[in-house]
Amino acid sequence: MPADTPVLEVEDLSVAYETPKGFLQAVSKVNLSVYPNEIVGLVGESGSGKSTMANAIMRLLRGAASVTSGTIKVLGQDIYTLNPKELRQFRWNKMSMVFQSAMSALNPVLTVEKQIVDTLLSHRPQLSRTEARERAVELLQLVRISPDRLRSFPHELSGGMRQRVVIAIAIALEPALVIMDEPTTALDVVVQRSILDEIQAIQSKSRFSILFISHDFSLVSELASRVALMYAGRVVELTGTDTLKSVTGHHPYSEGLLRAIPRLTVDDVTIEGIPGNPPDLVTLPTGCAFHPRCSYVMPECKTVQPSLATVGDSMIACHLFTDKSGRKEERHA
Amino acid sequence: MPEQRRLVSAEELIVRFPVTVNGKKRRIVPVDRVSFEIGEGEVLALVGESGSGKTTVGRTLVRVIEPSSGRIEVDERDVTHIRGRDLAVHRKKVQMIFQDPFGSLNPVRTVEQHLSLPLRIHDQSNERIGDRIDALLERVGLTPVSETRVKFPHELSGGQRQRVAIARALAVNPKFLVADEPISMLDVSIRAGILTLMNKLKSDFNLSYLYITHDLASARYFGDRIMVMYGGRVMETAPSRELLRHPTHPYTRLLLAATPGNAMRELPLEKGNQAPNLFEGRMGCPFADRCVLTTGICREVEPPVESVDPGHSVACHHVV
């Protein structure tokens, strides 16, 4: 783990939604840091709280959602203490976000050029229009789109190109942190691959940090150096991506996910699903939220919420690894 | 080719759709001379990107779409242009599972109502429909049955909904299922359960499937053979293991290299990434614009489908 001060420091973060059925705890006491020049993956299924986390970090939570505890610091700055004007300057200058749906992230009635130039000029008023245009050309080249596309409207571009434009806008002001929320989920695999390769190339050249949110374990493990796995609003495992090659030595949920994915490279193609269904966040199971689906469940799992503890090089929130009965050695071996 | 009895065959299937481009009427060919066979109890995985024609092939087999030309045979009957009563008989043999279990179920009908409808239409005998529903729900793992029967789709999770859709398809005792991306909208932890269920149904009922997917990893898990389509044409067909071990067509190789979790990292294998030309009258190989091996002949002459190994065929001018 890098020793520098983190670019993103999430401490004890909880986010709740007010619903007619009661409070829904979408994110519970999450701690997560992203260091300079690092790509961290945030993996989870629908309803695990990963997108809520992203919105909380960008301070984009609206309506019924609110941060109920914890702090979020970006470059040491607590973003929830910024006033609206400061926040507007801080966002995109220091941190930006790439959304899943490129079509709805772009304005359909403005050209690509206008959208990039507007972004640049609203944050860097000292730039001249010509300079901003030159920068727009540079940015498009960076994401491998021909600059003659500047005059195009979003609907004239393919899905992959649109997402490239969104990425170009996200990195336009050279932020220290880019949050990418499922940026390639709606795209074909080949396009996905080339966009991921570009993200990696740009990242290693321009040196910024990425929090990469995805539901796809194998994709994240190719891109990120560390992965946080969320289940029912909590981080249940935080580990280096190299450990994901082995299905053992993980939280039972991670293990279940690893066993559930058919693999391309191994000869053994048996897969096993995780029994049961993702939990209802309003009526979360007591103790460890995963216990009704866990094949290693023990009595204390039903009552005591496990917290993240160091296991080898990982952090895992599971009683199996802190259990004194000796099963820990057996599982981690 | 499978040693089993042949259940489905498609010969030189062509589907054309009219489109309007800049006020002019033109035709696109999303499925262009596609031929394949599926044996009894066999799974053919059809892999391709969006716009490859894979969904259109599936819909044509169920005969939601009538092909413009070519021939479809299911269970030794020509079903290419059948209508009315014959079509109803055909649908009893061939059922479809859709991608979106939120869209394919009626939100105001209970699970029971979803399952009794096909039973009434295709079986007519009103007796014992209840027992049959119980058996179906048990079969797809939606227990306790008495609780599931009265539920509405919104009370079920995505995986459970897809199980209802599978039960509904099974209600008429089909021989052949077209499953169009049945797991791509589900959570990762749920996908494996649906795949293993479909696998079990295959062996229990000797069912055949056309498994349509964009994901080579699941195609390899579930498919006995894999057929790769691009721009309406079949690029390569081979037994699943063989296809992944010896991908021969440049497009298959590109697709495999792009799939997360693969061993080979040999990109870039393409130049440009424009969508294929689907207009009628196009020439040459549909992949020519993206292929690194393209030479003059690729843009002029459509490569024939040639066998490179028993059961392994490829359509490419540059395959040695």
Image: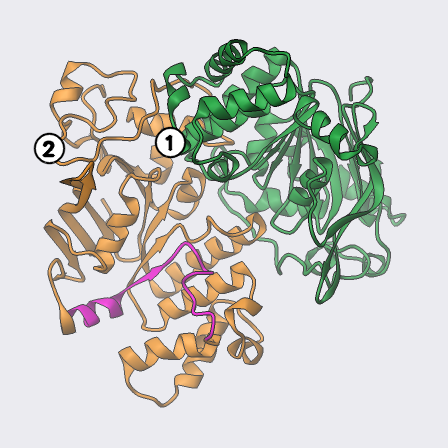
Chain colours: A green, B orange
Q: Are marks 2 and 1 on the same chain?
A: no
Q: Position of residue A36 (x, y in %)?
A: 73, 19
Instruction: Please name whichever residue, A239 or B76, is drawn nearer the observer in this view of the structure.
Output: A239
* Mark 2 crowdedness (10 Å alpha carbons): few <14, some 14-19, many ≥20: few
Q: Comparing marks 2 and 1, which lies closer to the viewer?
A: 1
Decide if residue B164 is on the left or right side of residue B209: right
Instruction: Please name whichever residue, B54 or A158, is drawn nearer the observer in this view of the structure.
Output: A158
Residue topped by disc 1: A158
Q: Secondary structure at mark 2?
A: loop
Query: Which disc number belongs to residue B281?
Result: 2
The residue shown at (11%, 24%) is B301
- Mark 2 falls within which chain? B
Q: Over which residues does the magenta segment extend?
A: B86-108
The residue shown at (21%, 19%) is B318
Label 2 to label 1, Cα distance in Å?
A: 23 Å
Up/down of B57 relative to B96, above or below: above
The residue shown at (30%, 24%) is B250
Q: Secondary structure at mark 1?
A: loop
| Three-letter amino acid code at the position of disc 1 | Ser
Up/down of A218 relative to A319, above or below: above
Confirm or deny contact between disc 2 and disc 1 (CB under 8 A). Answer: no
Q: Position of residue A157 (x, y in %)?
A: 38, 30
